[in-house]
Structures are given as C-alpha cells and as structure tokens.
Amino acid sequence: MRKHAKRIISLLLCLCLLLSAGAAALAKDKSGTEPDENGCYTACKGECGHTPSIILHGIGQSQTFVCDENDQPLVDAKGKTITGWPLYFDVDYAIKELLFPLLLMLITQHDFGLTDKAEKVMAELLKWNRCDENGKPIYNVQTVKYPYSLARCSQEEKNYIYNCIPLQTYSSAAGEDHLYYFAYNSFGNNIEICDELYEFIEQVKRETGHDKVNLVPISLGGTIANGLLEYHPDVIESLDRVVYIIPALNGSNIIGDIFKNNLSTSGEMVYEKMFPKLTDDEMTGNLINILIRLVPDSVLHKLVDKVISGMMQGVFTNVTNMWALVPSEDYPACRDKWLAGEEHAAIRRQTDRYYQAQLNSKANIQKMVDAGVGVFDVVDYSYPLYCFIESYDKVNADGIIQIESTGMGVYSVPKGQTLPEGYTQQFVNKLGTNNCADPTHHNHLSPDREVDGSTALLPDHTFFFYNQDHEKTGRNDVVMKLATALMVDHRITDVYSDPNFPQFNVGRDGKSLQNDLAYYDARVDRSAYTPEQLARYDAARDNAQRMLDDTVVKQGETEQVKQEYYDALCDMGLRSPPEPEKESRVRLGKFLKAVNDLLNKTWGYRSFHK
C-alpha cells in the first residue's frame, strides 16, 4: 500500500503541477563565519578557478508556510501546520462536504449538486496558494530560503538541500562555500522571483569574490531562467556556465491540457487503461474501473469540468508561475479562456510578458552562447506523460515534460515508435540555424531512433538519458556527476569531450544503491559470517561499486547488480527479502480484471446508468 500511496501522492503533485514569492522566512547564517571588508566569505577571494554555482530548483523543492500577522505558522484545528508546500489538504472538510451529495448521486443516479460542490471543495482545498488580481499571495505565505552558501547552512538545511538536489560531488570539487540554493515559492509571482534571482546573483558574486556565476536551472527552474534572461538581459555578463537539467523551457503539456480541459475522458481510457497506470497496480486500477461505472457518464464528465474549474479558481488563475508552465502554442487560447475579463488585466499583462520570454527563449539562449557563456542541456526521454491528458501518447517525454520543451526544440517520435526508415538528421533548429560544429561526422540520432538531436538548439551540448523518469532525475547519480563535471571542468566543451559522459546514456537510480552501500558497510561485522557469505557479499558489493563508478550506463545492468547485492545481504540476514504477493490478492486481482474485461466486452465503455 505504501507504494500505491506514493504513486497517488505523485499524481496529486502532478495535478498541482498539473493540478509572491512570499516574504522570506527568517534565515540566519549558522556558521558564524565573518566576511572581509568587501563582504567576501571565501578564502579564495575569487581566485580559485571554480565559479560559484546557483541551483534553481524544480517545483515544490522549497518549503512554504502560511503564517499569521506575526509571521507565525498557522495550524488547523488538529494542530497540523498549514503549509503552502508540501500541499495542505483539509481531508476532513472534503469528506464532510462531499459525502452526502456523493451518496445522493449514487442512489438517485443524478447530479443533485455533487459537481458544484466538488468545484467549491477543490477551490477551497487549494486556497492557501491563491494569489490576488495583481498576482500577489492573498495569504501571508513565507518561503524558507537560504540567503547564504551551503558552507554557512546548518546541517539540517544542508540535508534538505542535498535531498532535493544531491550535488555532494560538486561540493567536494569546488567547496560548499561555492554552492548556493535559490529557494522560491513554486506558486509565486514569476516576475518577482526573477527580479529576486537577479539580485541574488549579485550577492553571490560579492560573497565569493568571483565576477561570474554558474546557473543550474532544473525543471520549473527553466521558466525562471527564461524570465531572468528576458527581464534582465545584462545578466549574461555575470554568467560563466548554464547547465539546464530537464528544463520546462516551453512549459509542460500536462499543464497545457489541464488549462484547456483536454483530459483523457474516452470510455476506453476511463474504464480500462487510466487507473491501472496511475495507481501502478492492476488490481486497484480494475477495482476503480468497476466502481466508477456507478457514476453516470454525464455526471462524470461534468465532474471533471468542475474539478478543473475548482483548480483554476483555487490556485491557477492568478498564479503567474503556474502560467509559465503553459506551452507557448497553448497560451493564447488558455489566456482567452481564463483571463479574458477586465478583472484579470493585471495578471494578463504579467503572463503576456512571460509568454514573450518563452517565445524568445531560444534566441536569448543563443545570445548567451554568442557572448561566450558555456550552455549545456541534460534531457530525459522515452518515459510517457501521465495518461490522464489527451496528448500523453502523442509526444516523447520524461513523464512530466515533453522533450521538445526540455530539449530546446528537439524533434522526436513518441515512445515505442521509431523515426521512419531512411530518415536523416535535419540539422535545423527552431531558429532556422544549425549549431552542430561538424554535420558531416556528428551523429545526433539516438540509438533507439526515437530522437533527432540535430534539431536541438545546441546539438553538440545536449546530453540525453533514455528511459529516465523526470521525478527521479535527482536520484540519477550519473546526471549529478555530469552536472558537476560541466560546472567545474572547463575542458568539457561538448558531448564529445569526455567518453565518461556520452551524448546518449541510459537512466538509472544510483542514489539508493550508493546510500545502501554506505549504510551496510558500517554494519557488517565480518566475524559473524561464514567465508562463503563474506565472499558473496564482497563480490556483490565490489560489483555494485564498480557499476556506480562507471558513468556509461548499460540497459538493465542496474537492476541486475542491485538484485545480486540485495540477495547477498538477505543471505547474511541484514536485509529481508520482499514478501511474495499473497495468493488471495493474486486471485482477487485476476477476478477483478476478468470482471472488468467482461464488462467492457458486454456492456461497453460506459457507466451502468444508461
């Protein structure tokens, strides 16, 4: 059940990604370090050769609290702190409001106000992140920020930052006094966040003694980078390298389809495919498929519309940072749908401004390149979008963002398809130019023939990871090592510079294995085991470390090596093998699938109520 709960939580996160920056929470330097007369905190005084780096995190990778007039966090009736992120949901309120109209609808097979009530409840649940007609937070939302380097953070702060973005390799190479984490409210005001980042860059330069910084925009951080370059073009003079990691440079189709209300509501999707995929469990999915037939089709479709409307009222309409996630091709229609009235004029001016930044994104990135800034892009692909939107199977993606957005215009075919026979590299990007240094000899076609990297804005500077989930990119140890190498080693100038980091690689989760190696290494009492057990453990442990040291990933190797290592631990009694699925559950799962298949065949893809 824990796995299913995490999957459902991920879906809720999507609904909020899917589904100002407020005043900063009080932060204090925990190190006691004093600056010199120029305000510099580093021993190198800017002469070490390592440019300081600023992380621009993704959605929800900072904590926000709803506070009272004294800046003290609010709590609900049960004493639970009300947070903007992680999202706070008043479950008791939702049950109280929805239970009776839901039962009445099931009994009568008529709406009887259920959908209107659902719209109201959704708006109320999301209200804490709501902004006013000027794009300012309605409530006193405070963001936990880190206005100093990691060297001056408390251990608790470091743990939080490294858990979000595990860049310990960078800290080891350049020092924690050269690493900064720019925290912002994901549901804040895009323009204000970009202005704050501009000032933060100047602060980092003063504190480190360096005249330039590196930026690492991750996911939603890509939209912040878009705005920064558009609103403050002179910032280019302060940049050394920019390492984009799965950036939402052209938004996410998930947000675009939600704003357009283009959800997957076909009968086949609703009654067969969607819920087993979203729950990652066929038994639970088929049970939902059967139970949802109790809701009349007319009510179900109206319910979807009302929930979307409630989400828009609750948070999306006036939150400009969420509008930044609408793809540029969808923005005009979405603006006309949700921001047409005069009451939205101020918001519309702000979102129009970001829309222009989005349209200019590639041109602004090209300006960085022309100015000598080293720009690189790390892209995940061949991982389908969440299937509750209509475009989920029409684009190649990383689960959250389509590759066209993260890859600066990369051309691709959906996962499972291949480029046509005889297809050749196009070598033309969205600006109508070709940035490949050697079209005659460079091959930018992915080995699986899903991606033509030659159409990217920066084909020689774009690294691809096959079958990598967007949400787990931070757990990919190779991506973190690559990001570190790009920031600290200026000998890496393109995807051909270092064979340890090839242009096309494979996704993996190395973080959990690395953590387990450290955990069990400290707990193995070698006197307590037989020579055979120790030999098996040593071989599996050394093989795991060898694999982690190898940054060229082989498809399927990670799972095999992990299994061998965990089997050795189980043999030593240090780890329990996974419990086999109960036979009763297996039988129930087969029964529910048979029932649902029979219903689809005999009754069709529709509710029980004709």
Image (cartoon, rainbow, N blue to C red):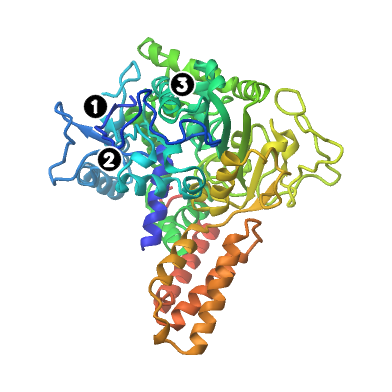
Residue at point 66%, 45% (across, down): 414
Q: Is residue 501 visible?
A: yes
Asked if marks 1 and 3 touch (Cβ < 8 Å), the reply is no
Name which of mark 1 and mark 3 comes first in the sequence. Answer: 1
Name the mark nearer the viewer: 1 or 3. Answer: 1
Q: Amino acid at mark 1?
A: Tyr
Residue at point 46%, 30% (across, down): 259
Name the mark nearer the viewer: 2 or 1. Answer: 2
Image position of 273 with respect to 191: above or below: below
**Most foreground residue, 515 or 446:** 515
Q: Quadrant of residue 572?
A: bottom left
Name which of mark 3 and mark 2 comes first in the sequence. Answer: 2
Q: Quadrant of residue 290?
A: bottom left
User: Dot 1: within a 10 Å radius of its alpha carbon, few (fewer than 14), some, or many (20 or more) residues?
Assistant: many
Q: Quadrant of the N terminus?
A: bottom left
Q: Which residue is mark 2?
A: 30
Q: Amino acid at mark 2?
A: Lys
State how far apart marks 3 and 2 are (Cα). 48 Å
Image position of 144 with respect to 339: above or below: below
User: Dot 2: within a 10 Å radius of its alpha carbon, few (fewer than 14), some, or many (20 or more) residues?
Assistant: some
Name which of mark 2 and mark 1 comes first in the sequence. Answer: 2
State how far apart marks 1 and 3 are (Cα). 26 Å
Residue 8 point in image, percent of width and height:
39, 52
Q: Which residue is mark 1?
A: 139
**Left or right: residue 127 compared with residue 163:** left
Q: In the structure shown, which secondary structural element does the residue marked by tag 3 occupy?
A: helix
Q: Which residue is mark 3?
A: 337
Residue 153 point in image, percent of width and height:
33, 41
